[in-house]
Image: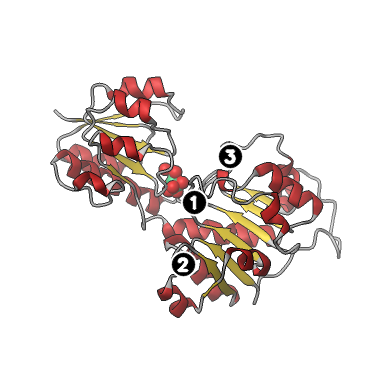
Amino acid sequence: MKKVFITKDIPARGIEVLEEAGLKVIVHPEDTTLSEAELIDACQDVDLLLNVGQLPMQKSFLEACSHLKGIALASVGYDHIDLETATALGIPVSNTPDVLSGATADVAFLLMLAVSRKAFYRSREVVNDQWKGFGFTQELGVELNGKTLGILGLGRIGVELAKKAKGAYNMDIIYHNRNRNTEAEEVLDAKYVDFDELLAQSDVLSVHTNLSDETRHKFNKDVFEKMKSSAIFINTARGAIHHEGDLTDALRSGQIWGAGLDVTDPEPMSADSPLLQMSNVCVLPHIGSATIETRTAMAEMAATNLLAALHGEPMPQIVNSDIYK
Ligand code: 8YV
């Protein structure tokens, strides 16, 4: 009987797909993060791996588990796996694009709105019995109507966010990409700008790029200095894309107005981070795709990809497609 190891619990539908195909499914029993040694040990006697979250899979892991017939990621990001080594070892890797675009864009929109009105901070005041009554000029927020939303990485998630922002607040959309997105320009009247223009013109700047050597700490002191002092920075992509210390300094000095983070580096964020005490900062625990509908669809997609790999067929959402050349 073929076996699959799953690193964290997933919605039942994903397990059903695998069991209905006759596989034995082994799910890591605790909601804890496995060490590399534990993951290697767990994968020794299985044929397939479903990696939930950002559990690192580097060269040492892949070489110790080169027998795996396939690895499915329950994420759209794949910065946590050494794809070059996986390909060299003949291990196909899949991810879960598209199905999570709407849910993740919802969180970017939620953060944009919550930060603009200091909603989470004000709510904490009530919860902690710190709000002592109405004040006409208490912690005033800012409005989004007609403002400019800048998107770094106008891909699937960025487009979904732009649609919501335009529909709800008639925001102007500008973006910077490696490549033009002419369809989005037509549908959303989005305008392509260079990176410095994106920084200078955005009232809200939302990051929707993958984490790479090029984007790691891309948002640093020098970049924040080029943004509007009224700007709100949003990151639902990967925490390492912004430099947390520089972001803290930029907010403290008023270089930018606010920040909304669904991702941090590290995760969880240190409980004593000054960001958590700021009224114009909202931090969420990486909930971008965390809805019943989306996580179920991701689990089913990952399972379907593993079955394809097991049967020697191309994974529908293959990431390292060179493996099939
Ligand atoms: C995942 C994410 O849901 O898709 C990604 O890259 O970061 C999240 O949306 C999370 O990593 C759980 O796998």
Q: Secondary structure at mark 1?
A: loop
Residue occupying image coordinates x 60% and y 68%: 149
| Residue 288 marker | 1
Q: Quadrant of residue 26?
A: top left
Visible in this render: residue 163? Answer: yes
Q: Vertically, is 151 above or below 46?
A: below
Q: Secondary structure at mark 3?
A: loop
Is label 1 or label 2 in front?
A: 2
**Marks 1 and 2, the one that precedes in the sequence:** 2
Q: Quadrant of residue 23?
A: top left
For the residues labelled 1 and 2, say whether their Cβ atoms are less than 8 Å apart: no
What residue did someone put label 2 on? 159
**Marks 3 and 1, the one that precedes in the sequence:** 3
Mark 3 is surrounded, within 10 Å at the Cα level, by few (under 14), some (14 to 19) or many (20 or more) other residues, namely: some
Please tell me which residue lies in front, 167 or 135: 167
For the residue marked with disc 2, what is the amino acid? Answer: Val
Is label 3 or label 1 in front?
A: 3
| Residue 225 marker | none
Q: Position of residue 123 (x, y in %)?
A: 71, 51
**Marks 3 and 2, the one that precedes in the sequence:** 2
Q: Secondary structure at mark 2?
A: helix
CA gap, disc 3 and disc 2: 25 Å
Q: Position of residue 216 (x, y in %)?
A: 55, 45
- Mark 1: C-beta under 8 Å from nearest atom of ligand 1: yes
Residue occupying image coordinates x 79% and y 45%: 129
Visible in this render: residue 118? Answer: no
For the residue marked with disc 3, what is the amino acid? Answer: Asp
Please tell me which residue lies in front, 168 or 248: 248
CA gap, disc 1 and disc 2: 15 Å
Q: Vertically, is 104 above or below 1?
A: below
Q: Vertically, is 306 above or below 4?
A: below
What residue did someone put label 3 on? 265
